[in-house]
Image (tube, grey):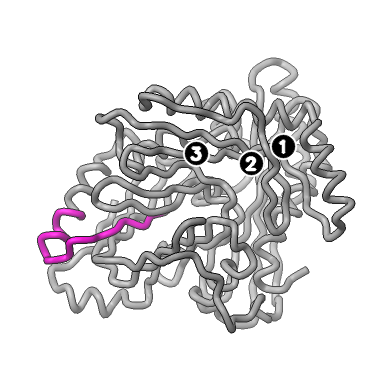
Amino acid sequence: MTIKASSAHQRLRSHHQDQIACFAGKNHHISARHLIHKIHMPINPHTAYNQQIARCFNNIKAQGHPNPILIAAIPFDTTQNGTLNFYSDFDKTAPAIPHNHPSHIPTTLVHKKALVERQAFEHSVQLALNAMASDKIQKIVLSQATEYEFNQQHNPEHIFKTLVKQNPDAYNFLIPIEENQYIFGASPELLLSRQQQQVRSNPLAGSRPRSSSATQNSHSKTELYQSAKDRHEHQFVIDNIRHKLSSYCSQFSASETPEILTTSTMLHLSSVFQGQLKDNAPDALNLALHLHPTPAVCGTPTTTARQFILNHEGYNRHYYSGLNGWMDANGNGEWVVTIRNGLLNHNTIRLYAGAGIVAGSDAATEWLETEAKMQTMLNVFQQQ
């Protein structure tokens, strides 16, 4: 674990002044610039992260800042270090699409490197199907990643504004990780939000690529909604959310049947869970961690699927398919699944995408689904 902090508030503020964090939810946009503490540590039940979080909030308040905020990114594998950024204050405004901002960032691709080749991905899919045939597992989510090197360094705030303009209905985020590294993305999936005693989750599972043709989209929606394979995959996620959240609620409701959620590049089966929390319910981050990883990004049974991914996927996901979001000192906040995202490091961008594998999945089709999902991020840089 590493902790970056300083009692010399002004010096720290100057040093980190470029480490802006942004989170654009569907009801508000949050931005924070005055970074006070940055902590790198595992965020799991075996660490003392709750004490660290409480200590940081209390220290910032003691410095005369009554409204601090935590904006953080948690990895898929919570035994790895997550990044917790504590800011002295933040701006919370109504949603707004940036005006007079380019709808893409013109750039030239210098080099492209696949971290997972198609043949390796399809082999892993077949291994997953074999495990399902022997009843060891019911669903596994497998992913791939590609690294793009461009001819110029990108401004993180410009990337964020472009994301918001291209994906106004998504949860857009920009979060500093290490020096000169940011995760950014346009997640369609709300893992959990908490506002006072109200809790909400909007899980997604089951997808089709979105087309420029309205006729094709109508056909794809019908096919997706009627697909036994996709409805089966979706039900794993819904049952998991209901099982894990209902015990914290005095009353709750969940969608009887899924709807179709449309993003800039994809169509998803979508359900909503809403509840009234009991008085002793955990804060927003701990509730979100209780859900993570859902079958939508890992599989089921969770422990078996997670180990299969770590053994066979062929690269380190790190923040991809983890969670990111914000929480205030009162425990209110929003946490989304870290998908449709990238890792920015100077002029290098690493992009990720995954697909849910269940009995009946076709390896080639699942690869093409990951390629379609990656297009959300590629559109930012006008790489078609």
In the rendered view, tell whether residue 362 sits above or below residue 324.
above
Pick the quarter of the image with the C terminus. Answer: bottom right
Q: Position of residue 250 (x, y in %)?
A: 36, 24
The nearer-to-camera label among 2 and 3 is 3
Q: Nearer the viewer, residue 98 or 71?
A: 98
Counting residues from the N terminus, which is met first, the one under dot 2 or under dot 3?
Answer: 3
Residue identifier under label 1 = 124
The nearer-to-camera label among 3 and 1 is 3
Q: Amino acid at mark 1?
A: Ser
Counting residues from the N terminus, which is met first, the one under dot 1 or under dot 2?
Answer: 1
Q: Position of residue 288 (x, y in %)?
A: 41, 39
Q: Which residues are magenta?
A: 57-72
Q: Do labels 1 and 2 touch, CB within 8 Å?
A: yes
Image point (59%, 58%), residue name = 169
Identify the secondary structure beneath mark 1: helix
> As drawn, which residue projects farthest toward the right?
215
Image point (75%, 24%), residue name = 130
Q: Is residue 48 left or right of residue 309?
A: left
Residue identifier under label 2 = 313
Residue identifier under label 3 = 201
Verify whether residue 298 appears in magenta: no
